[in-house]
Amino acid sequence: MNLLSFCTCRKLFSVIFLSLTAVMFILSPIAFSPNEYTYAEDNTNSIQNCSDDSLFFATVSVNGDTSDQLISYVKRDQNILINAHLFCDIVGGQYFPLGQNYGLMVQYGKIISFAANQYQYGFVAFQMTEMEPPAEAVNDTVMAPINFLAQAVDGDVVFIDAEQHIEITVSTPLEIGDIVPEAKTLANALSQQNYTIQQGAINLVNAIELYVAGYQADCNGNNANYPYLMMQTPPCPEVSYVPSIPMFYTMRPDEAFVLIGRTPPECTYYSYRSYLFSRYFEDASPKRTKIYASLGDTQSLYNMSEGRNVPDSFNRFFMLISAADKNTTDAIRNAAITLGIHEDDIYVDVIPGSTMQMGLDEKADFFNFFHRAVLFNDPAEEDQFTNNPPLEWLRITPNVSAPPDYLPVTELRTRGTGSTEFYLNDGLEQLRQQIINRYIADCDTINLVSYQWIPEGYEAIATRFNARGENRDALYLRTPFFQFQEHDIIVVFGANHAKTNKATYCNAGILGVPALNGLGGVNNLEFQGTAQEFLADSILADNFYVWKFARSALDAQTYVIPPDSNHDYTGIDYGAFAVMVFRSYVEPATKVGPAASEIIMDQAILFRPKSTAVENNDGFSRSDHPELYIYPNPFNSQTNIQFTLPTVSDLKISIFNIRGQLVKELFSASDFSGSKKILWQGTDSSGIPVSTGIYLMNIIYQNYNSKQQNRLINKILLIR
């Protein structure tokens, strides 16, 4: 008997995607896969019906009870794909196609899962899950692997080939009120007032994994090591599919969302805010453009007690209504008060409906909502809160649609107090000179002058700028891009804005480019005393900080950035591009991010050894390693591949699909050195255009000074 058994234990796996590098990165939105930007009408090319559509049928049992339904499946090597829609019907879950069958979303209680057709990875409660094999559309029906569906229902799925029988074991799904009892009483009250209530999900999200798996165009400059809790939601009841992955949603003008539960345990900062993720523009290409801009001030640790009788800011009950319509907001608020929820515990996250493109059609705005919390006092409490948040997320839809009465837009808080850090300018210059003196004998000096990176959310919307999920509680600075070589040292320094009372907390970090993958950094709790060795005679030394970013630990104030040896974007390869970023959160006096005009900009200097051709244990000098640029990437019709190899080598460049099958050999040469520019027009070896998807560029080179064969694999995204 051939037994294929898949249980819910999530396996450890390594991600097999290599770093994507480019000579330049443009901070305007990138056209990407349909999962992130494109609405359903644009996705007909994503309906990839398999070539072998021979359907089989199996009997089914659930928790030992035999179903009277048969389920269709197809065979793929030693695995099977089963009809995901029928599976959900049988187990009592909900199934939604992603657009026009280019993938699927499954909801089982509070577990929301999604996967795109032909993608190697899907997500279950935002945990990356290998699709064994990838989902496919067969006769316009999405077929999904049983390992993915087993995890999606927190159970097991066993296929008994000899009996053509599928045994399903499922757990009892969590319902509204199972985490926050008040959510159930509120939902029941609103249901009696002619509203439909749907539950969503709240999970810890990993921006790098979403990027690696191909569901986002970049990592949005994620603030590494600081958790993001992301809301996922089913579609409006009148819509039979989800237009994007479920962390992004459209809204009928009279709909609302409710976040209900408890605030985090003691920490330095937390906040809640809705975002405009993307917008449809007739004159844009692609027409849906990523903006990812906040829609006003947050509800945060520092302002949620203003004008309210709130005994404590931590671990306390609250309810937040995210809505554009006043009538729906008032109905929810009144129902909550009637049930005994105190008015001081109810907050409103205003979506400015009059300036949004509300609705459910292909031109409607995509929204997003997430919760940030950082620097917890107790790591154990952080782990418990982020992995099991005491919160519920509800979608509230009036059963009878009515013209909206939009809520008034809340006035934005004013940044700045008139007080500046400029009294520290002389000390900063002294600090700079002492740092340069430390390294100048052996290193070239490259000043990485920082500047304000991300504008206000409304400015980003007006200018179509990708604000990458900013919020008004912060001021964002960045340096220019630079290549991070093996022996480089980046010294970051400046005023400790928390010490000068211009911020509640601040940090310095590093991102890879062009993925904008946050790799880590240091915060003001680690700044104290770090400038003392450079300013030993200054009484102002405690107002400054100095930290280093390097490939190995130079001292206790070094943040180590390894190469991306696992090819999962948790490092930066030698010679790849990077950028330093600085964040300053919440000036205490204003309870919003500081004004750029009142702080001393954080500084960065790159020190590069005057001789960088240092031998290493593979026989190469690092200057012999290749430089590779792919642009544009993602691409639609053609992309340029520029390759430089200073040392004479054998060289072969090929394109493979995500299943490891050769698509086309682009270039092959012996005794190659120098630079080569290759154009790939998205065709296979027969000149036939290939379909939308992720492709892998495989580069093999061997230097004559070494017997070792070297390989690079880079991800390329083709969008038809």
Image: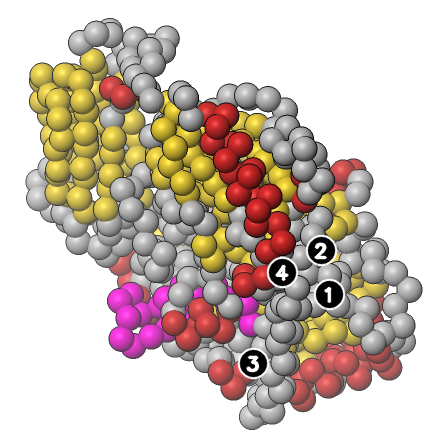
Q: CA distance from mark 2 to mark 4?
A: 10 Å
Element carrying mark 4: loop
Q: Nearer the viewer, mark 1 or mark 3?
A: 1
Residue 352 got which mark? 3
Label 4: few (<14), some or many (≥20) within 10 Å?
some
Element carrying mark 1: loop
Q: Mark 4 sits on what residue? A: 420
Q: CA distance from mark 1 to mark 3?
A: 26 Å
| Amino acid type for the residue under numbered disc 3 | Pro
| Amino acid type for the residue under numbered disc 4 | Thr
Residue at left offset 71%, top offset 40%: 539
Q: Earlier in the sequence, mark 3 or mark 4?
A: 3
Residue 589 got which mark? 1
Residue at left offset 69%, top offset 52%: 500
Q: CA distance from mark 1 to mark 2?
A: 8 Å
Horizontal relation, residue 285 to residue 498: left or right: left
Q: Earlier in the sequence, mark 2 or mark 4?
A: 4
